[in-house]
Amino acid sequence: MTGSSLQLGPDGQLRHLLTIEGLPRSVLRTLLDKAEGYADMRRGDDKKNLALHGRTVVNLFFEASTRTRTTFELAAKRLSADVLNLQVSASSTSKGETLLDTLKTLEAMQVDLFVVRHEASGAAQFFAEHAAPDVAILNAGDGRHAHPTQALLDMFTIRRRHPSFSKLKVAIVGDILHSRVARSDIHALRILGAAEIRVVAPRPLIPAGIETLGVKVFNELDAGIAGVDVVILLRLQKERMVGAFLPSTGEFHRDFGLTRARLAKLSKDVMIMHPGPINRGVEIEGDIAYGDTRSVILEQVEHGIAVRMAVMETILANRP
Ligand code: CP
């Protein structure tokens, strides 16, 4: 069974969230609509909701995370779930046995939902295949395969400025080859009907056959971002690089970094996005991230809570 078939029940309801690939547009829209109800909470507001009262959520992170882990934790707590955070360092023991043992041990504690991040592509699907029928799995990023809630929060952020995707032109810039965010964003943009999706990177960082996902490939930044509504920047993922892909990060910044000079050539309404973590001076110049009104990077972080609340509530509402 593929991840995309495993995650939908026979009735079309979302049982797990493993990948954006193959999800119907109606499912994405329903999740984004539901997230609207959780967005725009301010500091003084009472943010508690009883939707997951009595449920138990475990954040099982085998790989480092700042944004995803904390926003999942806040999201679960705002829905009144009991939350356990496990920061598991990857060990040299047999991966299959370790994952299975971990899952079964925690399942015995009557956990309802596991949020899983792992450096291996397919880890979340492995959990979903082996979980008890009443346990849900949510992929918080697996290798270079998928990061579905990042794509949903990116779509949520875009949709607030562009309610229709039908005329939208989006450029995804940087290390496409190693990026689970790029893959998930491409699938989400396609499903929601974006007019044009571009991937912009030096040739070694473009995966072979990426055109089959319905994207246009550019190996030159100025041409790649000309006339787009949204620029999604990605960091160089050195932890996933085996061997030398680029002469230097300095050269990458010179040729593919978003500088003030390049930003000045774009529309005053262009949205600059980045899933984080940001490498200043590599894919983005100095203070653009937080010092330019066109950057929506902190909105993305904030929207991560609303979107993750919507996903967890939806999945657990579809469970007994
Ligand atoms: N965007 C993202 O996944 O960030 P973290 O690795 O900090 O969770």
Image (cartoon, rainbow, N blue to C red):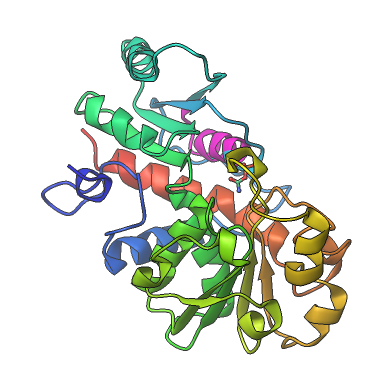
Magenta segment, prevailing SS (helix, strand or loop): helix
**Image height of 68 relative to 301, above or below:** above
The answer to whether residue 71 is magenta is yes
**Image height of 277 relative to 73, above or below:** below
Question: Which residue appears at 51% of the width and 73% of the height?
Answer: 159
- Indicate the position of residue 267 as horizontal and vertical percent values: 72, 88
- Indicate the position of residue 100 as horizontal and vertical percent values: 32, 17
- Indicate the position of residue 84 as horizontal and vertical percent values: 51, 21
**Residue in front for this viewpoint, 272 or 227:** 227
The quarter in which the N terminus is drawn is top left
**Residue in front for this viewpoint, 225 or 153:** 225
**Image height of 13 relative to 102, above or below:** below
- In magenta, the rendered stretch is 69-82
Q: Quadrant of residue 209?
A: bottom left
Q: Horizontal placement of 263 versus 179: left or right?
A: right
The quarter in which the C terminus is drawn is top left
Q: Horizontal placement of 36 versus 19: left or right?
A: right
Question: Which residue appears at 35% of the width and 10% of the height?
Answer: 105
